[in-house]
Image (cartoon, rainbow, N blue to C red):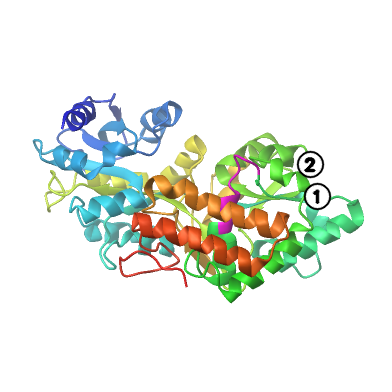
Amino acid sequence: MAVLAVLIALLFISCPAKEGTMAADAGGPPSAGPVILVSDQLNPAEEAAALRDRILGEFKGTVDFRPREGSMLAPETMAALVETPPRPVAIGGLHADFKDLWAAGLLAPLDGLYRKLESRGFVPALVDLARLDGSTMFYVPWMQASYVLAINRKALDYLPPGVDVRTITYDQLTAWGAAMIQVTGRRLVGFPAGDKGLMHRFLQGYLYPSFTGSTLVKFRSDDAVAMWERFRRLWDVVNPSSVTYSTMADPLLAEEVWVAWDHTARLTKAFRERPGDFMAVPAPIGPRGRGFMAVISGLGMAAGNAEADGAPAGGAEALVEYLTRPEVQRLTLAETGFFPVLKEGARADVPSPLDSLADAVVAQSAAPESVLTLLPTGLGARGGDYNKAFLLTFSDIVLGGRDIRATLDANAAVIQAIIDETGAPCWLPDVSDGKPCRLE
């Protein structure tokens, strides 16, 4: 209880509020008092300053922005917040945050607000995800980050005939890498497979869903066996130094690789320093579609506060409306590197160094062939062990040449033990009835 009291006390220490002016039709009347925005997003000092000083610069009203670590969105803390004298409260968090708050009954339904905003063209897959009970909107998509392919334009000269880099398949990527080797003698495809790289996210969110339609349930399926056989062939054209790369921006800038997969945040350095040399495209497509992993942030409202139960629209609703405008989405990208959640209108006026990355992220999440994969949920402290099981599978099969079926069976047992211990249900693209996920 002492810890909870400290957390609540910290929550009510107001951060500097930001006031701005705008046209009369831009967001309705200001709220009577500051709207509280509690968020575990944009909490680093530079990002928080960008939100207060520039992104909110045209917002009509006052925002009490409280950037905090994820614990400040814990259900018990939010419950204490909404029990205080009524204040409009908006919540900025990750999809997993909203799932926990919804399960605790602490989110207001936002169907009415979303109907006012849906003409902006939110990415359908992200909207579906925000319907936490399958039908009701409990948050509005706000920002996204993802992982894409970054390409040095020199590599386009070696693209096999008839291949479109925006819809490239994994087999075509292999052929492209082989063509570059044939002419240059160099293996110019790269992955961040070093100690601090995100290779595990590639396996979980890209390779597995693209070939099996699953990230977990089909871990040791026949489709998975075929997938690893084909990935071995792809690895034959990958730069061997990939096992030392933690991020891909520097290898791209040094031209050690010409084609690289990585998280957008780890690629922006290359695009900012040499925007004319690089382009970004969605990840490759496999037999089951284009697996992709999205890190999704949303904007919700706390149940039981000044607006949540049908009170006149004001601060919190106006803030959600404002932050999801196309021009503000683009400004958010420019200031923070987080990408828009709108299908259309995200491209115009995007700052030129990042326009290609923005296009790739939005196209990847909006394309009908894309298979959305979420970050692992429900694993708690065992999340690291789960990631290690995927990396060990990769190391044994691709780098060590071990038997695929035997390796998958052994590591499937490890993963199932982690799931059984934590009780974690399946997460997209796998589904379950709320019981612990079961590998087939």
Quickly name the residue at label 1. Answer: 154
Q: Is residue 29 left or right of residue 370?
A: left
SS under mark 2: loop
Quickly name the residue at label 2. Answer: 255
Magenta stretch, residue numbers: 194-203
SS under mark 1: helix
Q: At which x and y percent is residue 232?
A: 72, 62
Task: Work out whether mark 2 precedes mark 1 in sequence or the reverse, and give the earlier one.
Answer: 1
Please give the name of the residue rendered at 44% of the width and 62% of the height, measured from the top-left corner: 416
Snapshot quadrant of residue 235: bottom right
Q: Quadrant location of the N terminus?
A: top left
User: How many neighbours does mark 2 have within 10 angstroms: few (below 14), some (14-19), or many (20 or more)?
Assistant: few
Q: Disc 2, disc 1: CB below 8 Å?
A: yes
Please give the name of the residue rendered at 72% of the width and 54% of the height, measured from the top-left corner: 399
Label 1 amino acid?
A: Lys
**Above-or-below relation of 423 to 298:** below
Q: At which x and y percent is residue 10?
A: 23, 26
Q: Is residue 248 part of the magenta span, yes or no?
A: no
User: Quick one: 66 or 422, which is closer to the camera?
Assistant: 422
Q: What number is the disc on residue 42?
A: none
Q: At which x and y percent is residue 383?
A: 44, 48
Is residue 363 among the parts visible in the rendering? no
User: How many neighbours does mark 1 have within 10 angstroms: few (below 14), some (14-19), or many (20 or more)?
Assistant: few
**Residue at the far left in the pictured view:** 85
